[in-house]
Image (cartoon, rainbow, N blue to C red):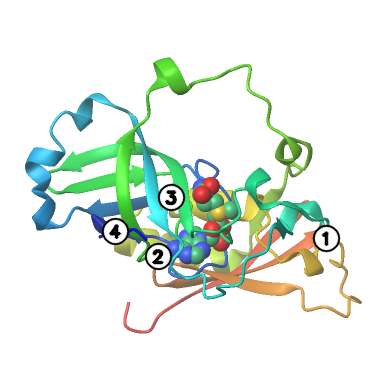
Amino acid sequence: MYEFTPIGFLKSCYPDKFGVPRQSGIVSSAYSELIISPEWQPEQALEGLSGYSHVWIVFVFHLNKSARYHAKVHPPRMNGESIGVFATRSPHRPNPIGLSLVEIVKIEKNKIIFAGADLVDGTPVLDIKPYLPQFENQPQAKGGWSVESESKNISVEFSEIADVELKNWISRTGRQELREVIVETLKQDPRPVIYKGYESTESPYRNKHAFRLYDGDIHFEFLSADHARVIEIKLKPSS
Ligand SMILES: C[S@@+](CC[C@H](N)C(=O)[O-])C[C@H]1O[C@@H](n2cnc3c(N)ncnc32)[C@H](O)[C@@H]1O
């Protein structure tokens, strides 16, 4: 057995799992921040990191409650098919440890701002390590089954009311990137597999969904398999 102590907890724009990108780099406009705990002497430990543009984040899938091990898993994009867990980046694995490649936006004393993380708010971070392009960039690398299941190009529109709500939200928070985060998040079609292919209004399935971004609920629907519409944006009353 080994014991690890997190170096910090990631503050992400995604408070819930639903909507979180399925891989790092997909929603490049999503910012997150990591404050390194004082016991690791961050100001010294981060020295030299500003020379790098990207880091690997090693973290714990802390929201995975199921302890049962399955050697084969069902990745959402395999439409019901199963595959060996070690051929996937599934959160459900022998040790619930994840690995994400993110861009460094800024380093301020004990705090690092990242772009492109695929993590839920509060994720415990075990370590960060610089990405070494001279060794790790492998243009000839094969992408396995995940390349074959790349999703189609999805367009995203905002209803009139959602557009007004978004503009107010941006002007109140100063977060210029909000529109892009919403669009990039919907472009990866975050809906559970069972809802896909049932976009018509006669569908027996619920076709309106919402994901949470900071303190806002983004209500959306898919009008067809490759066209999403933001219906409205509901902010928490206190915000
Ligand atoms: C497929 S995993 C890939 C994560 C990482 N890039 C990797 O390859 O290890 C990404 C998904 O993990 C889930 N997730 C993110 N943070 C999590 C956490 N702290 N606990 C459990 N699940 C999490 C979200 O549903 C997200 O879409």
**Tag 4 residue:** 4
Q: Amino acid at mark 3?
A: Ala
Left or right: 84 in relation to 45: right
Separation of marks 3 and 1 at Cα, in angstroms: 29 Å
Which element is circle 2 on? Answer: helix
Foreground residue among 43 and 177: 43
Separation of marks 4 and 2 at Cα, in angstroms: 43 Å
Mark 4 crowdedness (10 Å alpha carbons): few <14, some 14-19, many ≥20: few
Is residue 207 shown above or below 130? below
**Tag 1 residue:** 80
Mark 2 crowdedness (10 Å alpha carbons): few <14, some 14-19, many ≥20: few
Q: How many marks?
A: 4
**Does any atom of ligand 1 lie closer than 8 Å to the CB of label 2?**
no
Q: Earlier in the sequence, mark 4 or mark 3?
A: 4
Q: Earlier in the sequence, mark 1 or mark 2?
A: 1
Residue drawn at point x = 46 percent, y = 23 percent: 136
**The C terminus lies in which quarter of the figure?**
bottom left
Separation of marks 2 and 3 at Cα, in angstroms: 19 Å
Which element is circle 4 on? Answer: loop
Which element is circle 1 on? Answer: loop
Mark 3 crowdedness (10 Å alpha carbons): few <14, some 14-19, many ≥20: many
Q: Amino acid at mark 2?
A: Asn
Residue drawn at point x = 63 percent, y = 47 percent: 86
Q: Amino acid at mark 4?
A: Phe
**Tag 2 residue:** 168
Tell me whether circle 4 and circle 1 mark residues in contact (CB < 8 Å). Answer: no
